[in-house]
Image (cartoon, grey):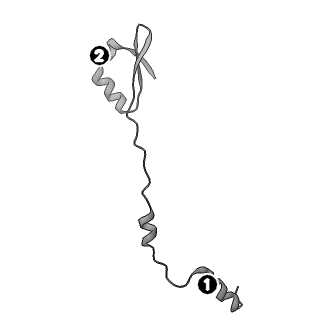
Amino acid sequence: MTQITIEEATKNLYKLLEKVAKGEQFVLMKEGKEVARLLPPQQEKKVFPNLNYFRKSIVLKGSEMSTTILEERDNQRY
C-alpha cells in the first residue's frame, strides 16, 4: 500500500481513483497518521444456486440399483 498525504490525494483524486480501479491501494496520511484507505471494491461473493429444483427434475429410468444388484446375484452375474 502506498502512503500519500491528503493534500496529494485532493490534487490527484481522479488519477488515484483510476489506479484504485485497477487494484492499487492507498493509505491517506494526515500529520503522519493514517486517516483513511482507498481500496478497490470488494468482489461480490458468488452464491451457488439452490439445486433442489434440479435434483427433483431428474427422472431415473429402469429399476433401482439395489433391485438390479439382487437380480444379478440371482442370475449369478455378480
Residue carrying label 2 = 10
| Quadrant position of residue 76 | bottom right
User: Vertical placement of 49 versus 24: above or below?
Assistant: below
Residue sitting at 52 percent across and 85 percent down? 62
Q: Secondary structure at mark 1?
A: helix
Residue carrying label 1 = 67
What percent of the width, then of the height, locates residue 18? 32, 29
- Distance between the alpha carbons at the discs numbered 1 and 2: 75 Å
How packed mark 2 is, by other alpha carbons closer than 10 Å (few <14, some 14-19, many 20 or more), is few
Compared across the picture, whether 14 is left or right of 25 comes to: left
- Which is more foreground, mark 1 or mark 2? 1
Residue sitting at 41 percent across and 13 percent down? 29
Along the line of sight, the residue nearer the viewer: 8 or 28: 28
Along the line of sight, the residue nearer the viewer: 68 or 17: 68
Q: Secondary structure at mark 2?
A: helix
Residue sitting at 44 percent across and 11 percent down? 33
Which quadrant is home to the C terminus? Answer: bottom right
Q: Are marks 1 and 2 in contact (CB under 8 Å)?
A: no
Q: Earlier in the sequence, mark 1 or mark 2?
A: 2
What percent of the width, then of the height, locates residue 63? 55, 84
Residue sitting at 35 percent across and 32 percent down? 21
Question: Which residue is outermost to the top?
Answer: 31
| Quadrant position of residue 57 | bottom left
| Quadrant position of residue 42 | top left
Q: Amino acid at mark 2?
A: Thr
How packed mark 1 is, by other alpha carbons closer than 10 Å (few <14, some 14-19, many 20 or more), is few
Q: Amino acid at mark 1?
A: Thr
What percent of the width, then of the height, locates residue 59? 45, 77
